[in-house]
Image (cartoon, helix red, strand yellow):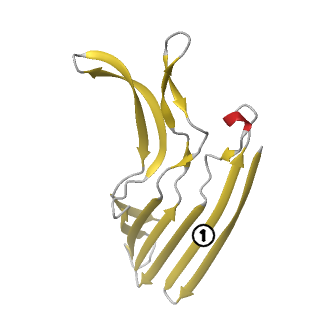
């Protein structure tokens, strides 16, 4: 069983060559399975309770500039609580309640600028060159978290299995250049 409730709000305004969009979303996603989490309700993996974004664009002659800010709640995850040995003496991971924990908030600022031009007076071939700077402040945004048992060498060069947390991160500061021809 899955229950989702929420609301989306979008405000959009134009002032001459300047445009701005503000959006906010609230979402609550609960799931329940008889076989999982002792039958108790838990957060859906895609539940992001709060999501806010603010985008701006400004056009000046052949130039266009944009700036965007995104801020949202982190996604839920199931935390590993330790390890145990099964009946065959294999090391296994034990977990807490399903999706009980939440990753840190996600935030990034992006900037881009483009310039349009023509290769001829007939305007049969148009060009566009641009630069974008993604995640300007180089935020370490965690996209998801998993756990693995990894073989490591402990002191005395003895191999043993250790519980390792693995965070998948979004891209850090990322510059991009674009060149486009339209004909």
Q: Is residue 150 left or right of residue 34?
A: left
Give x and y (percent) for residue 24.
60, 70
Q: From the viewer's perspective, tell me whether residue 72 is left or right of residue 42.
A: left
Camera-nearest residue between 15 and 30:
30
Residue 13: image location, x then y, percent: 58, 84
Q: Nearer the viewer, residue 125 or 178?
A: 178
Is residue 40 shown above or below 103? Answer: above
Left or right of 80 in this view: 5: right
> Would you place residue 173 above or below residue 115 in this image?
above
Report the residue at 64% width, 64% height from top. 26
In terms of image quadrants, where is residue 135?
bottom left
Q: Residue at x 73, y 41 (%)?
A: 32
Give the answer, above or below, for where 132 lies relative to 79. below
Q: Residue at x 70, y 49 (%)?
A: 30
- Residue at 58% over, 63% down: 50
Residue that numbered label 1 is attached to: 24
Q: Quadrant of residue 77?
A: top right
**Spot occupied by residue 55 in the image (x, y as percentages of width and height):** 50, 73
Image position of 170 with respect to 132: above or below = above
Quarter the N terminus occupies: top right
The answer to whether 177 appears left or right of 82 in the picture is: left
Quadrant in the rendering for residue 158 = top left
108 or 133, nearer to the observer: 108
């Amino acid at each position: 069983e899955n229950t989702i409730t929420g609301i989306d709000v979008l405000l959009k305004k134009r002032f001459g060559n300047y445009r701005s969009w503000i959006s906010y979303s609230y979402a609550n996603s609960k799931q329940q399975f008889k076989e999982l989490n002792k039958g108790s309700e838990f957060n859906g993996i895609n539940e992001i309770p709060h999501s806010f974004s603010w985008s701006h664009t400004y056009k000046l002659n052949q130039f266009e500039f944009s700036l965007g800010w995104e801020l949202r709640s982190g996604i839920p995850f199931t935390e590993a609580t330790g390890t145990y040995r099964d009946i065959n003496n294999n090391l296994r991971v034990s977990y807490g309640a399903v999706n009980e924990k939440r990753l840190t908030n996600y935030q990034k600022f992006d900037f881009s600028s483009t310039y349009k031009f023509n290769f001829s007076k007939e305007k049969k071939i148009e060009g566009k060159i641009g630069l974008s700077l993604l995640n300007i402040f180089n935020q370490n945004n965690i996209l998801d978290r998993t756990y693995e048992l990894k073989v490591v060498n402990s002191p005395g060069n003895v191999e043993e299995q250790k519980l390792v947390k693995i965070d998948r991160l979004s891209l850090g500061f990322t510059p991009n250049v674009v060149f486009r021809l339209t004909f």
